[in-house]
Image (tube, helix red, strand yellow):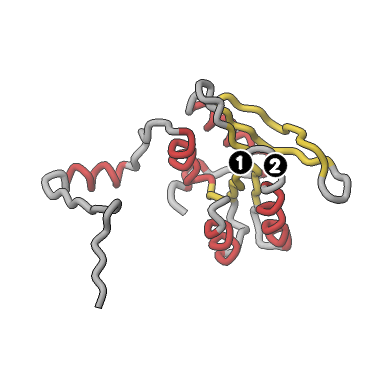
Amino acid sequence: MAGKSKAVRGGAALADSVLRLGEELGLEVKKGFKVGRRIWGAERYIDVILIHKQTRKTLGIECKYQATTGSAEEKIPSAIDDIKAWPIPGLVVFAGGGFSRNIQHFLISTGKAVHFDDLRPWLCLFFGLPLQDATPEKKKIESANSSQAILFDVTHPKTERF
């Protein structure tokens, strides 16, 4: 994953990093919010809740960190299912070098998970915030190719039938 410079070092640190990012983006943040019970009676908590201050659009975030390979990633599919029971939209944010490539691809394919390094632009899109942070490489490519604009018509793609 890109942007490993802000790598976190544990589950609590991941939740704290998500909180700080939410604050940097001007969102209201809450941590450890109780939201009912699971099927076997255990209390259900949302690790982090982010709220847009003007629109009140809300997102719950389940934080998953795994430093080394192991069986913890077997619980990931149930985390994806668990957020479906939340009364608000939810997302799994994951980090750590212990997730296998297979589980990383599974998470991303659900549309309900994102690696922490990719969270800032995801949140900007979700909450309708300015997309301010292009990477230095991206900025360099944009400025080098500014005279070579290529436009794609994604609203009315040309289809040809044989």
Q: Give the residue drawn at x 51%, y 25%.
A: 55
- Counting from the top left corner in percent of width and height, residue 62 is at 66, 43
C-alpha gap between disc 1 and disc 2: 7 Å
Furthest-top residue in this view: 54
Position of 91 with respect to 45 (left or right) is left
Q: Which residue does the numbered mark 1 point to in the structure image?
A: 89
Q: How many marks?
A: 2
Q: Secondary structure at mark 2?
A: loop
Give the class, few, some or many, for how many residues have Cα within 10 Å of label 1's Cα (few <14, many ≥20): some
Residue 10 in percent (x, y) is at 66, 44
SS class of the residue under badge 1?
Answer: loop
For badge 2, the amino acid type reads Trp
- Compared across the picture, whether 3 is left or right of 60 comes to left
Residue at 43% x, 39% y is 125
Q: Is residue 89 above or below residue 33?
A: below
Choose between 153 and 43: the one closer to the eye.
153
Residue at 47 percent of width and 46 percent of height: 118
- Residue farthest to the right, as pictured: 41
**Quadrant of image for the C terminus:** bottom left
Q: Given contact means CB atoms under 8 Å apart, are the residues at marks 1 and 2 in contact?
A: yes
Q: Residue at x 13, y 50 (%)?
A: 148
Return the residue nearer the eye: 136 or 48: 48
Which disc number belongs to residue 73?
none
Tell me the residue that label 2 is attached to.
86
Q: Position of residue 25 (x, y in %)?
A: 48, 28
Q: Amino acid at mark 1?
A: Pro
Displayed quadrant of residue 90 = top right
- Please identify the residue farthest to the left as the structure is shown: 147
How crowded pointer 2 is (Cα within 10 Å; few <14, some 14-19, many 20+) is rated as: some
Query: From what the image shows, is residue 81 above or below residue 105?
Result: above
Toward the front, the furthest residue is 161
Residue 28 spot, x, y in % from top left: 58, 24
